[in-house]
Image (cartoon, helix red, strand yellow):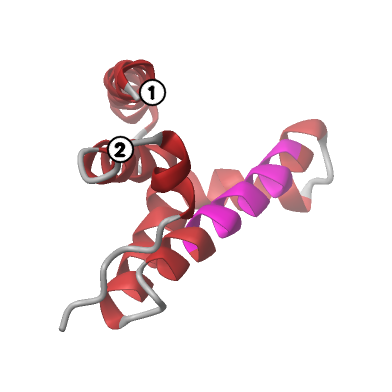
Amino acid sequence: MVVLRLALAAYLVLLTAYSAVVIYHHGWNLLPVFFGDIAAMTWPGQFNFDFTGFLLVSAFWTAWRHRFSPLGLALGILAFFGGMMFLSIYLLVESAKARTIGQLVTQRAAQAA
């Protein structure tokens, strides 16, 4: 679990730095570029379309862990639009509650009573 947490933390730092540089040079205008590449039917578009599948799986898994509650649905939306920036933070927080990686991945979050 320690290795996973270190990897998540390192990736979060690197992704944040990389994103800051991209935003500085190109602004926040991601969606037209992202969907424009998909519409152009190019390799970058194929990658973006493939990546969208990973975002959907991440969103559904996050919502499922929270039993599709209002919180789970909100976190699912954040997972879809936040990508690895969201998921790294989410997994770091949730890994503090789990004892093994298996529990982290398969255990559903406790439902509030």
Name the spot of residue 92 as percent of width and height, x first: 26, 36
State the residue at coordinates (34%, 71%): 72
For numbered disc 2, what is the local secondary structure? loop
Q: Amino acid at mark 1?
A: Leu
Name the residue nearer the viewer: 75 or 108. Answer: 108
Q: CA distance from mark 2 to mark 1?
A: 12 Å
Which residue is label 2 attached to? 99
State the residue at coordinates (38%, 23%): 4
Q: Judge the density around disc 1: few (<14), some (14-19), many (≥20) Cα neighbours within 10 Å.
A: few
Name the spot of residue 89 as percent of width and height, x first: 27, 39
State the residue at coordinates (71%, 48%): 49
The magenta segment is 47-59
Name the spot of residue 84 as percent of width and height, x first: 42, 38
Q: Is residue 50 left or right of residue 29?
A: right
Most extreme residue toward the left is 113
Name the spot of residue 27 as percent of width and height, x first: 34, 36
Q: Is residue 113 left or right of residue 104?
A: left
Q: Is residue 53 magenta?
A: yes
For numbered disc 1, what is the local secondary structure? helix
Look at discs 2 and 1 and give the one toward the viewer. 2
